Image (cartoon, grey):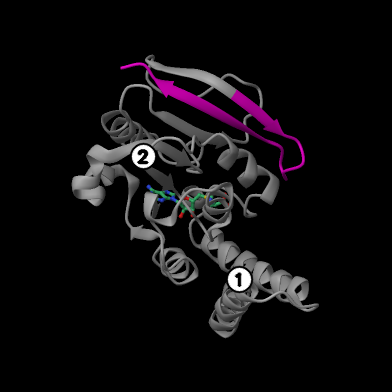
Amino acid sequence: MIQRNLTRAKTLINQSVAKFRDVSLSRRAANSTQESPQTDNKKSKSTRFEWILFTREALRNYRTIGAVWVSSQRLAQTMASFVPLTESGLIVELGSGTGIVTEALLQHGVAPERLVSIEQSASLADYLHQRFPDVQVIKGDAQHLCELLGDDCQRVSTIVSSLPFRSLPHAVGHGIIKQIDKILPKEGLLIQFTYDISGRGMLFPHHFKRVSFKTVWGNLPPARVNVYQSEQ
Ligand SMILES: C[S@@+](CC[C@H](N)C(=O)[O-])C[C@H]1O[C@@H](n2cnc3c(N)ncnc32)[C@H](O)[C@@H]1O
């Protein structure tokens, strides 16, 4: 019975995604070029579509999505606010989902050509690619980050991560942390959010010093943005 209802829910979500996907992208495009009384309405319809797309992915594989809702704008803006704009290196975003943090990074002032988005889910990466045509979107697993970035691996100055380390299998999380450690130069920043607001922190290497944090109580659930700096 539960299985049948779940299958029915998944089918309904799949149908909605197929139906609203193109509409959502064209609304996003229209919103960025015109201001009209209907803009807010169009925006909320795009947001609704993104919620459906995200929920479908979460139903397919909760452990890699690690959340049932997309992050709030406030959480995304808080993450973006920690990104220094004075550096020339690349900013790599891990686990971009439907692009709420990507959008906040661009609004913060990050030039699209400095931003690389890594997303494992094919449908989310495809959506990101269409939503942000000027940003380099790479569909791939952050466990192979350096390989995915190619020569750009040497040019990274900041990593902004929404990866759900607490729900990812331990070996996967460990593999990704090794890659982050390999890529981030001395004094490079890692900005990571977590739903663990206790402040115990995550299992990053000892030379990743936490230099700042902020709790976003308005997110559902409340989240904490931690900022680490590599000391070697
Ligand atoms: C918690 S969601 C965050 C989505 C979005 N940034 C937000 O804040 O709403 C985590 C995202 O990480 C992606 N992800 C999980 N494991 C990954 C991996 N190994 N490599 C790349 N992306 C991954 C998921 O597909 C999902 O889109």
Residue 38 percent coordinates (x, y) = 77, 79
Give the residue at x 62% y 30%. 196
> In the rendering, at what x and y percent does residue 203 appear?
44, 23
Compare residues 1 and 226 and report the one nearer the observer: 226
Q: Is residue 74 left or right of residue 107?
A: right
Judge from the rendering whether residue 186 lies leftward or rightward of residue 225; answer left or right.
left
Q: Name the residue under label 1.
A: 32
Query: The residue tagged with tag 2: helix, strand or loop?
Result: loop
Depicted 109 relative to depicted 34: above or below: above
- Quadrant where the C terminus sits is top left
Does the magenta run of residues contain 42? no
Q: Which residue is drawn at 73% across and 69% down?
A: 44
Region rendered in magenta? 213-232
The foreground one among 216 and 42 is 42
Q: Which residue is pictured at 29% across the width and 31% down the height?
A: 178
Give amino acid for label 1: Ser
